Image (tube, rainbow, N blue to C red):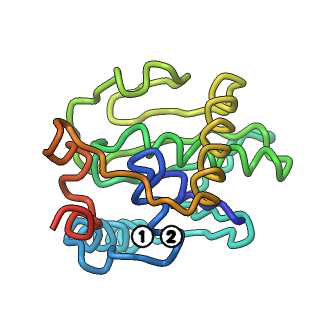
Amino acid sequence: MKLTWVLVNYFVHCPRQARLFYYNIKSEHTSEDVKIWKILHQLRYWENNYSEIEFIDEGIKIDKINFKWKDLIEIEEFKKSNKQLRAQIFQLLFYLFKFKNLGLENTIWKLIFDENHKINFNEIKDLDYEIDWDKIFIKLTSKNENKLKNILDEIEKLLKNWNIPPKIKNKSWWPHKNCKGCSYFELCWI
């Protein structure tokens, strides 16, 4: 079973979404948010004269790498907004974990947002990170690595189970706030 950044991000956002995606039930092509995100990424690459780097075997797709002094690598990840901050951070922790396994331990990941919204720090209070204006810096501390390993174990259990996880609800009948803007909304709720 190959775990990728998409699965980690989707699982933290919604386990149901991760399972549907893993079994090739995909609906990103119907989402306006996904289309906007892809256009923003392409514009950023075009304006700054660089392109995405993909490590196919490792399930990693990198927006930008900056080689700093000695062996320090700073990697930038661009996001449209910080609305799914916890999922985005676990995606980056997954990247850092993969880099550590490749022998690149002295790596810092910088998360940069195109839209600045008020960051809900309660969402990530159990993780180690640093903030600098519109950027969040992530390192693979032992605390963050343990949290990630727990999530990777949960993902593996989820994907081995034949049952699709239930929909996430705010009340007994209403969709959760994470469902708004999700490309799987219609599949789950309509």
Q: Position of residue 98 (x, y in %)?
A: 73, 51
Q: Are marks 1 and 2 in contact (CB under 8 Å)?
A: yes
Which mark, residue 17? none
Q: Which residue matches tag 2?
A: 50
Q: Secondary structure at mark 1?
A: helix
Q: Which residue matches tag 1?
A: 45
Q: Position of residue 185 (x, y in %)?
A: 23, 63
* In-image side of 165 versus 154 (left or right): left
Task: Measure how far apart labels 1 and 2 are at the Cα level.
Answer: 5 Å
Q: Secondary structure at mark 2?
A: loop
Mark 1 or 2 closer to N-term?
Answer: 1
Q: How crowded is the residue under tag 1: few (<14 C-alpha within 10 Å), some, or many (20+)?
A: some
Q: Position of residue 35 (x, y in %)?
A: 26, 74
**Quarter of the image where one finds residue 69:** top right
Q: Residue at x 31, y 51 (%)?
A: 167
**Is 31 rendered above or below residue 181?**
below
Q: Residue at x 49, y 24 (%)?
A: 130
**Quarter of the image where one finds residue 85:** top left
